[in-house]
Image (cartoon, rainbow, N blue to C red):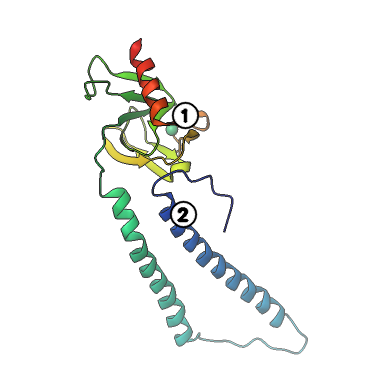
Amino acid sequence: MMRWLPENVGSFGQDVDWLFHLIYYITAATFVLVATAMVAFLILYRHREGRRATYTHGNATLEIVWTIVPALILVVLTFLSVPTWGRIQQQLPASDVHVRITAKQFNWEVSYPGPDGKFGTEDDRTFDNEVHVPVGKPVILHLGSKDVIHSLFLPNLRFKQDAVPGREIVKWVQATKPGKYEIPCAELCGFGHSGMKGYLYVHTLEEFAEWQKQAWAS
Ligand SMILES: [Cu+2]
């Protein structure tokens, strides 16, 4: 198994990684097959004195086979992906942790609703480029943008979602391990795009309660 993926600490990361590896190995095998055939043909059919080129009109059977096999593979991959896609994208788990992440050139504005549980009221707290979440609990993300399209990328949670101006996109994630993880912007959004970086802090439940107490104390 490949070791170059970032550490997975997301509740649906295993399913995403399984599909990723499956597709990776299918494409890797196809690449080896094509490259080997190409090199073999280069050697077998190289120029030789006295040998004339022949003209061929193709091979219908071969063409049907190499069209149908990839088509079948794609259909199978689709059916294998549907349950994971449905679980991640088509359900919103019940949760009392809500975070509003608003992208702008070139920052992530991160707001919490505060004790009243409502956004846009006095007790909201807003932070720049830091998202704090508790471990083991679903977190509802309310994604927006103030200017252009950005993309919130949480590589360790196997989560990536565009933030689109004029729309609120509601998604969820759940972290399985405390730690500090990177949040890059994954959509070229202007000259400061490469520096548009935040951090995701996954806390234990006690640490998260403590962080909340401090954030709302001031
Ligand atoms: Cu951006």
**142 or 207, nearer to the observer:** 207
Q: Residue placed at 22% from the left, 17% from the top?
A: 121
Q: Position of residue 168 (x, y in %)?
A: 26, 34
**66 or 125, nearer to the observer:** 125
**Picture quadrant where residue 160 is located:** top left
Mark 1: secondary structure: strand
Q: Earlier in the sequence, mark 1 or mark 2?
A: 2
Q: Quadrant of ligand 1?
A: top left
Q: Which residue is mark 1?
A: 198
Q: Residue placed at 73% from the left, 81% from the top?
A: 47
Q: Is mark 1 within 8 Å of ligand 1?
A: no
Q: Position of residue 90 (x, y in %)?
A: 26, 50
Q: Give above or below for 194 relative to 212.
A: below
Note whether residue 104 is visible.
no
Task: Identify the amino acid type marked 2.
Answer: Asp
For residue 101, which numbered disc appears in the image?
none
Q: Does 92 sit left or right of 163 as displayed?
A: left
Mark 2: secondary structure: helix
Q: Is mark 2 within 8 Å of ligand 1?
A: no
Task: Identify the amino acid type marked 1.
Answer: Gly
Q: Locate the C terminus by quadrant.
A: top left
Residue furthest to the top in view is 218
Q: Position of residue 123 (x, y in %)?
A: 26, 16
Residue furthest to the front in view is 206
**111 or 203, nearer to the observer:** 203
Q: Residue placed at 52% from the left, 45% from the top?
A: 7
| Number of other residues with Cα within 10 Å of mark 2, as a class: few under 14, some 14 to 19, many 20 or more | some
Residue furthest to the right in view is 49
For residue 17, which numbered disc appears in the image?
2
Distance from Cα at disc 1 to Cα at disc 2? 23 Å
Q: Locate the N terminus by quadrant.
A: bottom right
